[in-house]
Image (cartoon, grey):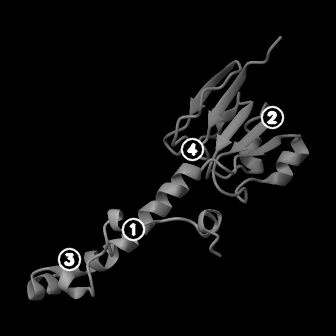
Amino acid sequence: MSTQHHIVGLDAWVEPPPLAFPHTIHLIRDGTALSNPFQIKDATILINSQVSVTRELLSHGPKVALVAVTGTGIDHVDQSALRERGITLCKVPAQNVDTVSEHAIALYFALKREILPMHRMTVEGRVWAELRTPHKAFASLPRTCAEETLVSPRMMWRCCGID
């Protein structure tokens, strides 16, 4: 006989993946997980990324057996309360790989294209009025992607024997 789990997403800003076990799911999207904790009364699994899982919140979920943290860090989870109740804590450390990678690429292009200095010049308006083009304020134009090669030091060592 399989158990039907009731999953509650405390701060459901993304859809959970397909789950291969019997379950129902309630995603709290309006930020009321703490102000209306009765929403977890039937939960056997809580999924969260930022909402604090406190002793008080857990007191409203007598059936909770698992807390799955999909965000970075677990300092917002009362681990003592979980241990006392025998609730399993599941961390998902690699859940942000795509987001972090995309953010790194976005930062690379922001630096490469000097987005912040360009924004500042645009807001101030002075450089645009005086120079008629912001690029005259920089030593040189940024290279295009076609003009660059981006590899890691480890890849350089493997490919070329370069340290």
* Badge 2 amino acid: Ala
Q: Which of 78 and 158 is in front in this view?
A: 158
- List x then y, in percent, for residue 11: 57, 44
Coordinates of residue 112 in the picture (x, y in percent):
37, 72
- Nearest to N terminus: mark 4 or mark 3: 4
Tell me the distance, in whole angstroms, between the alpha carbons under discs 4 and 2.
18 Å
Query: Mark 2 or mark 1: which comes first in sequence?
Result: 2
Helix, strand or loop at disc 2? loop
Q: Quadrant of the C terminus?
A: bottom right
Which of pointers 1 and 4 lies earlier in the amino acid sequence? 4
- The residue located at (69%, 51%) in the rendering is 93
Residue picked out by circle 4: 11
- Going from N to C along the chain, the mark reached first, 2 or 3, is 2
**Cα separation between marks 4 and 3:** 37 Å
First of labels 1, 3 by sequence position: 3
How far apart, in angstroms, are the residues tagged by discs 2 and 3?
54 Å
Mark 1 vs mark 4: give the one in front. 1
Does 98 sit above or below residue 38? below
Q: In this view, does 162 lie to the left or right of 111?
A: right
Viewer-proximal residue, 35 or 27? 27
Mark 2 or 1: the one toward you: 1
At horizontal 39% and vertical 73% (from top left) the residue drawn is 111
- The residue identified by callout 3 is 122
The amino acid type found where label 3 is placed reads: Thr
User: Percent position (x, y) of residue 17?
Assistant: 59, 32
Q: Which mark is residue 148?
A: 1
Q: Is residue 5 above or below residue 60?
A: above
Q: Name the residue under label 2.
A: 65
Q: Which quadrant of the structure image shows residue 41?
A: top right
